[in-house]
Each structure stands twice: as structure tokens, then as C-alpha cells.
């Protein structure tokens, strides 16, 4: 079994790495496959249009791509031993389409890895 120290040691680095893995998968067009494993069974995504359930997130991300992205202004909020929020700013582009968002991903440690329980995006105005 993994001790609690292994879960929480350098937590910011672990969560930032996990978030990069998700972005990299989306850039490859493989986001659906990635989040099939990376999302908690009851996970959700909150976007401008509303709340998207896990299965719809997976379907929407498969084949969707970005040309490039960058993450900055990382902040981690611990929620006990097995949950935390990673908040950050993301800029991404696809051709002439550019986004600038504040994002937060709530991670829970289940089944031996950090999984996405909720992800929210807010436009930077």
C-alpha cells in the first residue's frame, strides 16, 4: 500500500504533472482515452454552457486538439490527505483560435492514482 507521505510528498509537482499529461493527451487528439482512466467515475466538467458528465467529457475530448498550451500561476489547495485542487491559468491556441482561462481541477486519490473529480473553466476578461 502507498503510505500517505507518498501521496502528499511534493503534491503540487504531482498535480501539475497530471494536468500536463491531460493537456498533452488532448494536443495529441487522445484526450478521451486519457480521461477515461484519469477521471473519477462520477467526475464532471463545468464550462460556459453548463455541467458535463464524465461520459460526455470523454466523447467531447476524443479527437479534439490544441496546437499549443501553456500553464501558469499554479496554486494548490489541499483538501485533506486524498483530495486537492489545482488552480492555474491556461492559454491555448488552435490555428487562429486562442483561449485564456482560469482553471481549477479537483483531484481525488482513488485506486492508486490522482483522478479528476471536477474541472472548471472561467474566461479571463
Image: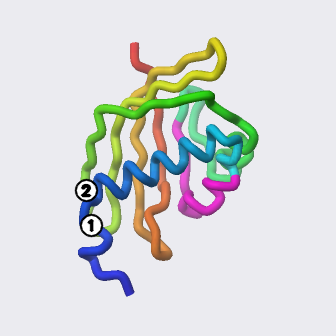
Check disc 2: other Cα within 10 Å, few if <14, some if 14-19, many if 20+.
Answer: some
Image location of residue 80, percent across then percent down? 25, 65
Identify which residue, 36 or 19, lies in the foreground: 19
Number of labels in the image equals: 2
- Mark 1 — residue? 8
Image quadrant in which you'd find residue 104: top left
Work out whether 108 lies above or below 103.
below
Q: Say which residue appears at 35% left-offset and 36% top-offset.
A: 88
Q: Which residue is mark 2?
A: 78
Q: Which numbered mark, 1 or 2, is in the foreground of this view?
A: 1
Question: Residue 36's image quarter?
Answer: bottom right
Q: Position of residue 11 (x, y in %)?
A: 29, 59
In the displayed structure, does residue 51 sit left or right of residue 63?
A: left
- Which corner quadrant holds the C terminus? top left
Residue 26 magenta-highlighted: no
State which region is magenta: 33-46
What element does badge 1 sit on? helix
Measure how far apart labels 1 and 2 are at the Cα level. Answer: 9 Å
Q: Residues within 10 Å of mark 1 (few under 14, many from 20)?
A: some
Drawn side of residue 120 relative to residue 78, left or right: right
User: Given contact means CB atoms under 8 Å apart, are the residues at marks 1 and 2 in contact?
Assistant: yes
Q: Which x, y percent locates residue 77?
A: 25, 50
Quarter of the image with the N terminus is bottom left
- At a point 36% along the width and 82% down the height, the residue shown is 2
Q: Position of residue 109 (x, y in %)?
A: 41, 67
Answer with mark 1 or mark 2, whichever residue precedes in sequence. 1
Give the structural element (helix, strand or loop) at label 2.
Answer: strand
| Disc marking residue 68 | none
Give the farthest residue toward the bottom. Answer: 1
Viewer-nearest residue: 15 or 110: 15
Amino acid at each position: 500500500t502507498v503510505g500517505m507521505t507518498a501521496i502528499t510528498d511534493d503534491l503540487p509537482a504531482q498535480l501539475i504533472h497530471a494536468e500536463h499529461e491531460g493537456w498533452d493527451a488532448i494536443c495529441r487528439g487522445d484526450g478521451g482515452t486519457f480521461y477515461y482512466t484519469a477521471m473519477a467515475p462520477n467526475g464532471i466538467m463545468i464550462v460556459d454552457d453548463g455541467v458535463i458528465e464524465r461520459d460526455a467529457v470523454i466523447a467531447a475530448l476524443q479527437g479534439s486538439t490544441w496546437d499549443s498550451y501553456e500553464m501558469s500561476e499554479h496554486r494548490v489547495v489541499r483538501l485533506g490527505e486524498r483530495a486537492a485542487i489545482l488552480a492555474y491559468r491556461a492559454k491555448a491556441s488552435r490555428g487562429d483560435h486562442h483561449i485564456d482561462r482560469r482553471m481549477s481541477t479537483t483531484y481525488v486519490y482513488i485506486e492508486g492514482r490522482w483522478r479528476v473529480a471536477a474541472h472548471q473553466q472561467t474566461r479571463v476578461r
